[in-house]
Image: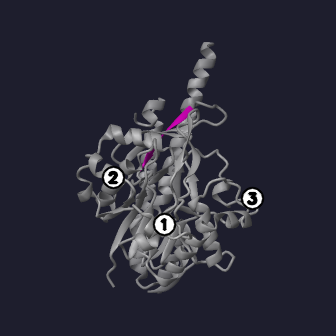
Amino acid sequence: MDERLEKALDFSNYMVTMYNQKRSFKEKFYQDLIYYYNGAQFTVTKDLISFCNVMNINNQDEMVLVDDNDVPVIIDDLQEFIKNITNIYFTASNNYIYNYNKLKNNRSVEKLVDL
Amino acid sequence: MTYNSGVLLFARNNSKIDYLKQAYYLAKQVKKILNLPTTVVTDSKDYLLRSFPDAEYVFDKIISIVWTNEQLTDNTVLGKKENHYYKSYNDGTISTVKLEFKNNLRSTAFDISPYDETLLLDTDILLLDDNFKNCFSQKHDFLIYDKSYDLANFRDYSEFQYVSDAGIKFYWATVIFFRKTKKNKIFFDLLQHIQENWNHYKSIFQINQSYFRNDHAFSIAIHIMNGYNEGNFAYPMPGKLYYTTDKDICWEIRKNKVIFLLEKERHKGEYILMSWQGITVHIMNKFSLNRCLDRIGFND
């Protein structure tokens, strides 16, 4: 095989593997963002954190939120809830960036998947 | 109220695939990760005990399905002529074999399960996180996956969205959570009725597949329970169901990680590497899963 083509194919395999690994980390991130509270399921988003914080600033101690399955849930300790979802968000995003940065330093297919 | 909770597995080998091996490994993972007991339902108890002498300790209960003609009536799921379907099993993109597919018993899960709260799993689930624990702390009595994610990410997944082109919503019978409630008893009885009259329901719901598939029977039963409509009889399992098909290869299983060779788009016989960490995944290539289990042994 022409050396130029061989090199291009090697690089192409590397790029596809890299892309797959990025997808796998992204899915892990989304999975890690799920917060289970009182039998309800919330995907933690920046919107959710901001909204809860605004309610908290407006002196709300408890409130009703609609969870991922469209079920209304009473959040009876809003401050605790904010603390937990913020914690979930930071843990998930820190893991994500840690894994993402690891990818950048790996220059071969084998290293990308830690063979 | 304290519930008696556990995991239920159906494992019935065919001539090439050792489902009991998968069940044994999964039961160990369930104990370790979810801290729950596991019951296995099998027609090969002797083989299980011969192959894994400590199986009686690993499993909470081993339920043996051995039936005699006297126990049976004509019109039951465990009918005299148990229909064993044949389907094609792939081992990657270039190896296919037609084998027996013994999937008839899932609709009996409600009656068979010794638990008030049951997590019903396929044996080819690789448990890598404790997400399923959340089923037991939530309020809904019946959970099933409707959302899924193909790790290869290029294949047509429309068959996992609707049972047919103009059909009803698709649900995965791979992982189900249920409590022993009256409503769920009605559901599982309905499921048996659908199974017994499969040809009728198959034609009504425009299902073209030649063999009986639990996913389809569950989808039809949920649709009926919802008043022939979309509704909320069934709530989604926590998170998404991640899967690889039998055209992918499970290459290596490590502690909390698995390495796959995923089918490469438009390049038959070629694969892309992917490592997958910390999220439970459904591995449809049973041959490669068993090869990996053989390699890691069962002490992990």
Circles 3 and 1 in contact, beta carbons < 8 Å: no
Q: Are marks 2 and 3 on the same chain?
A: yes
**CB atoms at circles 2 and 3 under 8 Å apart?**
no
Earlier sequence position, callout 2 versus callout 3: 2
Is B272 within the magenta? Answer: yes
Label disc, if present, on residue B24 of the rendered structure? 2
Q: CA distance from mark 3 to mark 1?
A: 25 Å
Q: Looking at the image, do the residues carrying marks 1 and 2 touch, with CB atoms under 8 Å apart?
A: no
The one nearer the camera, B145 or A57, is B145
Query: How far across and how far down the image is residue B250, in percent?
Result: 46, 40
Compared across the picture, whether B45 is left or right of B89 comes to left
Q: Chain of mark 1?
A: B
> Which corner quadrant holds the N terminus of chain B?
bottom left
**How many other residues sit within 10 Å of disc 2, few (<14), some (14-19) or many (≥20)?**
many
Q: Determine whether B22 is above or below B198 in the image.
A: above
Let me know if marks 1 and 2 both belong to one chain.
Answer: yes
Magenta part of the chain: B271-277
